[in-house]
Amino acid sequence: MLLAEMLDFLKFIKAKYRQEMLEVSLLSESSLQKDWLLPEEDEAWQDL
């Protein structure tokens, strides 16, 4: 019984971690997208 509860808890923690990583990725993408559209970004990448 204790092992089953521990396994359930670990699965819960893993799922929560994955959800948090997904949220961070989505928020980062949105933030980077805004920066990418700035004229300064075009200028910075112009010589590459």
Image (cartoon, rainbow, N blue to C red):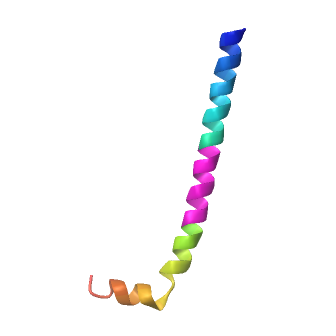
Q: Position of residue 32 (x, y in %)?
A: 52, 72
Q: Main secondary structure of the magenta part?
A: helix
Give the answer, above or below, for where 1 lies relative to 12: above
Q: Position of residue 30 (x, y in %)?
A: 59, 70
Q: Residue furthest left?
A: 47
Quarter of the figure that contains the C terminus: bottom left
**Residue depicted at x 56% and y 78%:** 34
Query: Is residue 9 left or right of 39 when viewed as pictured?
Result: right
Instruction: State yes or no: residue 26 in magenta.
Output: yes
**Residue depicted at x 61% and y 63%:** 27
Instruction: State yes or no: residue 21 in magenta.
Output: yes
Q: Quadrant of residue 11?
A: top right
Residue nearer the viewer, 26 or 6 = 6
Q: Position of residue 40 (x, y in %)?
A: 43, 89
Query: Is residue 14 left or right of 43 when viewed as pictured?
Result: right
Give the answer, above or below, for where 24 lies relative to 44: above
**Residue depicted at x 69% and y 14%:** 4
The count of marks equals 0
Residue nearer the viewer, 42 or 5 = 5
Stretch of the chain drawn in magenta:
18-28
Give the answer, above or below, for where 4 lies relative to 14: above
**Residue depicted at x 35% and y 85%:** 44
Q: Quadrant of residue 10?
A: top right
Q: Position of residue 23 (x, y in %)?
A: 63, 55
Quarter of the figure that contains the N terminus: top right
